[in-house]
Image: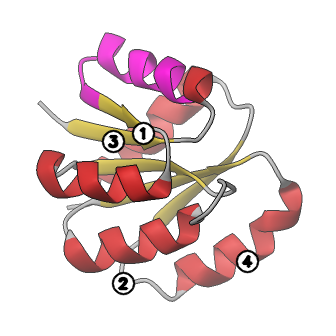
Amino acid sequence: MQRVLVVDDDRLVADTLTLIFEKSGFNARAAYSAEHGLECSREFVPNLLLCDITMPGRDGLSLVSDVTRELPACRILVLTGFYSNLKSVREKSSSLLRPVGILTKPCQPSELLREAAALLAIA
């Protein structure tokens, strides 16, 4: 069973996304900050990290950098509700060794699952 770690400081969003993945056959967990997300990624070792970009304190891009370095097999899908973040997210993701999916919030569950499946298929 594929493992998905959802990191978003909005608990309702994180819990809803986790539920979407669970109902679709994934083993999913939620974390509510980048720091907690890094801790969870080390113990849970997800196949996919779904991460919000804009969070208080440490942002999602720094979490993506750490997870990419520490868990090279983990696929990354980022979410942002701010279109102004897209350029920096694309620039940052282009410097990584593997593809990073980028979605804007809100997005349809079908779109989220389709993008996650595409990333997980790249092995």
- Amino acid on which the number 3 mark rests in the picture: Leu
Q: Is residue 43 above or below residue 94?
A: above
Label 4 Cα crowd, 10 Å radius (few <14 / some 14-19 / many 20+):
few
- For the view shown, which residue lies furthest in the bottom direction? 95
In the image: residue 87, left or right of residue 112: right
Instruction: Please state the horizontal and vertical placement of residue 25, each as a whole percent of the image.
Output: 24, 18
Q: Is residue 44 above or below residue 109?
A: below
The reply to whether discs 4 and 3 touch (Cβ–Cβ < 8 Å) is no
Return the disc, 2 or 1, that comes first in the chain's sequence.
1
- Image quadrant for the C terminus? bottom left
Badge 2: how crowded within 10 Å, few (<14), some, or many (20+)? few
> Which residue is identified by label 4?
88
Which residue is at a point 13% across and 50% down the rendered structure image?
43
Whole-Å distance between the Cαs marked 2 and 4?
A: 17 Å
Disc 2 target residue: 97
Relative height, residue 121 to residue 28 (above, below) = below
Identify the colour scheme used: secondary structure
